[in-house]
Amino acid sequence: MDAGLARNAHVNVGERLHLYLPDGTKAAPLVVATYGRGMGLSELTMSRADLATHVTSAFDTELWTKGGTTAGLAPLGTVLDRDGYSAAQSLDRELNAWANAVMAAVLGGFAAVAAGNTLVMTVLARRRELGTLRLIGSTRQQILRMIRWEALLVALAGIALGTAIAVATLVPMTNGLTGQGPYIPPVVYGAFAGGILLLGLTAVTVRPGRRCAGRHWTNDRDTTHPGRGRAPRPNRPRGADRQGGTAVRGTPRGRRPRVRARGRDADQIAAAWLHDSVEDDALSEQWLTGAALTPRTKAIVRAVTKRTGEGQEAYARRILVTPGALLVKQADLAHNADPQRLAVLDEPTRKRLTEKYARMHALLGLEQGS
């Protein structure tokens, strides 16, 4: 019997192996020898005379002979010499190997498509967060580099996890079948790992990453700095100013230099970029709560974000009691009251907004035009 089977059955040479024959008859043959590579021969070899009466068909499937001629053996069936028999066995193994390779390729293709779709959807689901990074000053290359590093870490984690699962299942199985551990060709494993890394990096950077990090988040009139601008406002026509619905083009880019000129505070600069997006519902309060921003930045954003139905007096009081918010609002007012920006408005709207900005200056204790 096969040495691996003998080891698993805890039977040694000279002992009896208790088993059931093909027709269900109990038997206890004596083990006279063990041999390796039982998968290439058979796990159990018994006398033909002992088995013939316990099988459905007692006809032999193969006859191995020594000596004789092809003509003399031809009436018994197909005659093969040693080389011919080995070639036939090799062909069977090659067909099995080809079928296994095709099955593995199909399963691997499905897995690759599923993994690629997951990575793509993960990036697309974060469009708002990536757009916010663009709004607060991150460059396109910085965002793409961040996405590539994330994809690389995910791919490496997947390779490590997949390898661990494969080893945990293959080692016990191959040890039970052959008494040896599995053989993993280094070249094949390296090709799979390299393919996974290439798939992960390609899936997130070729299309979705570039789309989210590129001009998708820009103002279509911003030709001075391509790739930079503000997020589209979903709840009103693109380009409509929140103060009355008048079509006035403007972006936070005009506020950031004014904030820098008044203090060069990173928290205030970030708040200047973000507060319009929160106020216009391009970014939600829930997003702001969970965003990776400093508490001071969040406090300033909430302070300078005017709430629906809120009076100017209450709005001004909240700005005055929030440290750092006054400077951001001052820059906001300077940007909104820019004569070039107001010049494109009709006379009634320009007059209404000028009076509104003048009143806010007074409530905040600022000089007009500061």
Image (tube, rainbow, N blue to C red):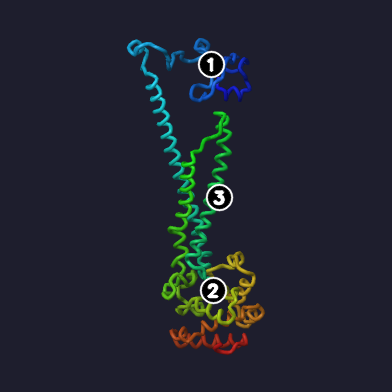
Please tell me which of labels 3 and 1 falls first in the chain: 1
| Residue count near mark 2 (Cα–Cα under 10 Å), binned few <14, some 14–19, many ≥20 | many
Q: How far apart are marks 3 and 2 (CA)?
A: 35 Å
Image position of 238 with respect to 169: above or below: below
Give the farthest residue toward the left: 71
Mark nearest the camera among 3 and 1 is: 3
Amino acid, disc 3: Ala
The numbered mark, 2 or 1, whose residue comes first in the sequence reads 1
Q: In which quarter of the image is the N terminus?
A: top right
Q: Residue furthest right?
A: 321
Tag 3, which secondary structure?
helix
Crowding at label 3, few (<14), some or many (≥20) Cα neighbours within 10 Å? few
Determine which residue is flagged by label 3: 157
Q: In this view, does 296 lie above or below 5?
A: below
Indicate the position of residue 260 as horizontal and vertical percent values: 56, 79
The residue indicated by pointer 1 is 23
Tell me which residue sits at (57%, 35%) in the image.
171
Do the numbered discs 3 and 2 sit on residues whose CB atoms are within 8 Å? no
Q: Quadrant of the C terminus?
A: bottom right
- Look at label 2 and name its amino acid: Trp
Query: What residue do we see at 46% from left, 42% from top?
Result: 187
Q: Which of 227 and 232 is in front in this view?
A: 227
Q: Decide: few, some or many residues near mark 1? Use Cα within 10 Å; few <14, some 14-19, many ≥20.
A: few
x, y (%) of residue 325? Answer: 62, 78
Q: Position of residue 14 (x, y in %)?
A: 62, 15
The residue tagged 2 is 273
Q: How many marks?
A: 3
- The residue drawn where x is 53% and y is 50% is 156
Q: What residue type is labelled 1?
A: Asp
Report x, y in % for residue 303.
62, 76
